[in-house]
Amino acid sequence: MKSSITVIKEQIKYFYLVRRLSLYELKSANNNNYLGMLWELLNPAIQISIYWFVFGIGIRGNRVGEGGMDFFPWMLSGIVIWFMFNQGLIQASKSIYTKIKILSKMNFPMSVIPSYVIFSKFYPHLLLLVLVSVILTILGFPINIYYLQLPIYMGAVLALLYALSLIMSTLSTIVRDVQMFLQSVLRMLLYLSPILWDVNQLGEELAWLKVIMKINPFYYIVEGYRTSLLGQGWYFIDEWQYTLYFVGVVAVLFIIGSALHVKFRRHFIDFL
């Protein structure tokens, strides 16, 4: 618990530095591209088009759920958060061992490194979210009062990402294979989350599978985004028990991650 408090204090104290470094990270990542930051929107757009063609038109006949909602807006409202989560966790998990040589000479704690890498993925997410909101409005899902709960899920995904990144960045610095394992898990997670297919369509004989999938905390975030963008209700209130579960899981992950990070960060340089 002491480690968790230490990490929280470091984030508060150096938050100004997190914002500055995250903007620098975002600019440097797209500096050598002719289209620059436009790729932060083009890449998701290309992937969304492929998923819609394969899973919407090819497999599901462009309909999903009991009410027969169009697959495209249903998928779009859930997948919008996937790109930030996927890239944020991958980049943050290898952030310490890839940047420690450069940043070790600077006077700030290493717990800041995964934090600013995650924030560098948050800015493109905001741009993508605006674009998705415009598209959904055109498709008949206008901006509604339930958008007010979006900051809750944004904070939730940032908290989940940071808690996981503390664990994965520490383990990846010690054992490089962890990074490859994480990428494999994330590939499976896309198909084991309610992004490309409706879990509610599972029959009663597979109800146990839905329960298992909801153990994944990312499930909560996807459904929260989808409920908000499609104007279907106050998800964090309607599913208050699941909300408490999510908070508990993130808290446990953060405590574990903080303990690992604080214990090993003095020795990170030895593993390079």
Image (cartoon, rainbow, N blue to C red):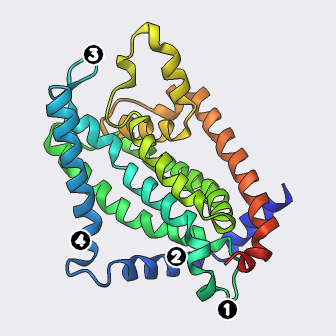
Alpha carbon distance from label 3 to label 2: 44 Å
Q: Determine which residue is flagged by label 4.
A: 38
Of label 1 and label 4, which has the lower sequence position?
4
Q: Determine which residue is flagged by label 2.
A: 19
- Residue 168 lies left or right of residue 55; in this view the side is right
Instruction: Select label 3 or label 2 by which is in front.
Output: 3
User: Can you tell which mark lies on residue 200?
Assistant: none
**Above or below: residue 243 compared with residue 257:** above
Residue 73 figure quarter: top left
Kindly state the secondary structure of the residue where label 2 is placed.
helix
Query: Residue, x 47% and y 49% (percent of image)?
Result: 184
Q: Determine which residue is flagged by label 3.
A: 66
Of label 3 and label 2, which has the lower sequence position?
2
Q: Determine which residue is flagged by label 1.
A: 105
Extreme residue toward the bottom, this view:
105
Please state the horizontal and vertical placement of residue 269, each as a whole percent of the image: 72, 80
- Residue 148 lies left or right of residue 180; in this view the side is left
Q: Quadrant of the C terminus?
A: bottom right
Please state the horizontal and vertical placement of residue 69, each as a whole percent of the image: 21, 25
**Above or below: residue 215 compared with residue 91:** above
Query: Residue, x 69% and y 48% (percent of image)?
Result: 253
In the image, what residue type sits under mark 4?
Answer: Leu
